[in-house]
Image: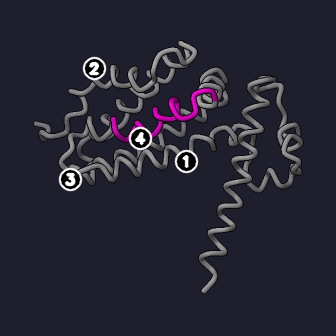
């Protein structure tokens, strides 16, 4: 009877520990640089042991990547829940708003994390790897929405990939402007350019 509430409490505790480690990591990495910051310094900042750290993360790269894992899951959920009659370009843009809205809700934190990821080769590689997983999941969602076969129609994967490229381009432009430009507007501009490529309404000839 009490198994589910107990599991929920345990999961919330794990999320709190992950968040605490992530916050400490981002602060140290932003101040000291990626290569100069060690896992021992991260755990010391939150009063944890390295053994405890290893229960949650395999490396310091994982700590930073964890900060985008939650929003990316919500992004895919948003795409899945968009109205069935909504054009793919509109649905994809709404889904990506989950990510772009972070620049409004948490501007300083989002800028720090984004600058860290884009400016650190090891983190950028992990970020691009994560985007590949997003593309695969988004392709599956688009297939379900359209009834098209992702194995036979490459437009599904292309649409997901192009949408993520538009987001990535807007993100980089936002970071380069030091947050002076609005990320939502930058991604809107990118989507206005790529919208025709996201049209999945017509079967390929």
Instruction: Specify the quadrant that holds the C terminus.
Output: top left
Q: CA distance from mark 4 to mark 1?
A: 16 Å
Please tell me the numbered disc located at residue 147: 3
Q: CA distance from mark 3 to mark 1?
A: 28 Å
> Which residue does the numbered mark 1 point to in the structure image?
70
**Residue at the image position 74 percent from the left and 46 percent from the top:** 20
Disc 2 on helix, strand or loop? helix
Above or below residue 9? Residue 123 is above
> Which residue does the numbered mark 2 point to in the structure image?
193
**Residue at the image position 88 percent from the left and 48 percent from the top:** 47
Residue 181 position, x and y percent, is 47, 16
Q: Is residue 148 visible?
A: no
Disc 1 on helix, strand or loop? helix
Residue 96 position, x and y percent, is 40, 37
For label 4, count other residues whose C-alpha is less than 10 Å away and answer few (under 14), some (14-19) or many (20+). many
Compare residues 171 and 135 and report the one nearer the observer: 171
Disc 4 on helix, strand or loop? helix
Marked residue nearer the N-terminal end (2 or 4): 4
Marked residue nearer the N-terminal end (4 or 1): 1
Q: CA distance from mark 2 to mark 4?
A: 20 Å
> Which residue does the numbered mark 4 point to in the structure image?
135
Report the mark closest to the observer, 3 or 1. Answer: 1
Residue range (magenta)? 93-108
Q: Circles 3 and 4: CB distance less than 8 Å? A: no
Q: Main secondary structure of the magenta part?
A: helix
Q: Is residue 132 visible?
A: yes
**Residue at the image position 33 percent from the left and 53 percent from the top:** 81
């Amino acid at each position: 009877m009490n198994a589910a509430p107990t599991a929920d409490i345990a999961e919330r505790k794990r999320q709190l520990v992950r968040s605490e480690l992530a916050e400490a990591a981002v602060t140290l990495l932003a101040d000291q640089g990626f290569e100069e910051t060690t896992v021992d310094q991260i755990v010391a900042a939150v009063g944890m042991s390295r053994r405890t750290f290893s229960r949650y993360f395999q490396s310091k790269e994982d700590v930073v990547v964890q900060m985008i894992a939650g929003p990316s899951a919500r992004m895919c959920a948003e795409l899945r829940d968009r109205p069935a009659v909504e054009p793919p370009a509109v649905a994809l843009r709404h889904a990506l708003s989950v990510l772009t809205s972070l620049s409004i809700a948490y501007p300083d934190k989002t800028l720090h994390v984004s600058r860290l990821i884009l400016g650190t080769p090891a983190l950028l590689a992990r970020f691009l790897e994560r985007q590949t997983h997003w593309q695969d999941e988004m392709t599956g969602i688009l297939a379900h929405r359209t009834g098209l076969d992702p194995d036979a129609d490459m437009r599904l994967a292309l649409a997901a990939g192009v949408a993520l490229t538009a987001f990535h381009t807007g993100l980089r432009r936002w970071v380069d402007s030091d947050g002076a430009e609005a990320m939502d507007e930058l991604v809107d501009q990118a989507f206005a350019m790529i919208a025709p490529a996201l049209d999945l309404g017509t079967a390929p000839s």
